Amino acid sequence: MKKTLALALLLIAVPAFAHPGHDTHPLQDGLLHPLTGLDHLLMLLGTGVLAALTGRTLTLPLLTLGAMFGGAVFGHLLGGVPGMETLIIGSLLVAAGALLLPRRQHLLALAMPLFALFHGWAHGVEASPGAFWVFSAGFVAVSAMLLLAGFIGGGLLRRHARLQQAFGGGLLAGAALVLAG
């Protein structure tokens, strides 16, 4: 049942979740977006938790952050790509699946930087050209803090399998909310 729901959510096409028009207060918008964009917030916290549960190093969060910023630059320079929105939702489903299927955590965690590329790409596409760099500085800084918060939280979840599954269920529910919104 969980696998069927996850697959169904992944296959539904939805609009991009980045919000255009970041030219009035680009730094403020960049700082706030990871906290107010549910898809972004859940992906970052989930990736941090997975990093703590799988490798116990900051390599995965750093790769994720770099991929997200690289994606923003690509989006800014190249425009949108087909399927970007589906991949953004996919990141939440993969993070949730990794927590709900502990035997697959290592493999699924490796996919998070790829998904982060598309989170960033969406922001690069929709950011105003004149405000891109300032907006990006804000969203990268707060994204780094959320990855670290997830990593610290994941360290606390290491010995609590039921809490790990509850967090995974929360990510899955969050993906459903993002789709509904």
Image (cartoon, helix red, strand yellow):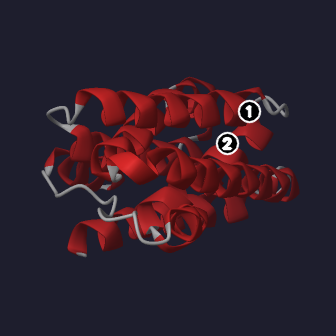
User: At x 32% / y 64%, what residue is drawn?
Assistant: 19
Percent of width and height locating residue 101: 54, 42
Front-lying residue, 109 or 104: 109
Q: Secondary structure at mark 2?
A: helix
User: At x 67% / y 58%, what residue is drawn?
Assistant: 142
Question: Where 169 sits versus 97, above or below?
Answer: below
- Quarter of the image for residue 31 reads bottom right
Percent of width and height locating residue 89: 32, 51
Front-lying residue, 155 or 112: 112
Q: Is label 2 in contact with label 1 (beta carbons under 8 Å)?
A: yes
- Quarter of the image for residue 174 reads bottom left
Residue 79 placement, left or right of 160: left
Spatial separation of the CA atoms under disc 2 and disc 1: 6 Å
Q: Secondary structure at mark 1?
A: helix
Percent of width and height locating residue 151: 78, 49
Instruction: Look at label 1 and name its amino acid.
Output: Thr
Instruction: Look at label 2 and name its amino acid.
Output: Leu
- Mark 1 Cα within 10 Å, few/some/many (few <14, many 20+)? some
Q: Is residue 8 visible?
A: yes
Question: Where 153 sits versus 181, above or below?
Answer: above
**Label drawn at residue 50:** 2
User: At x 71% / y 32%, what residue is drawn?
Assistant: 62
Residue 152 placement, left or right of 92: right
Front-lying residue, 51 or 78: 78
Residue 86 placement, left or right of 140: left
- Quarter of the image for residue 54 reads top right
Residue denoted by label 1? 54
Front-lying residue, 80 or 118: 80
The image quadrant where one finds the C terminus is bottom left
User: At x 22% / y 74%, what residue is drawn?
Assistant: 180
The image quadrant where one finds the N terminus is bottom left
Percent of width and height locating residue 116: 48, 38
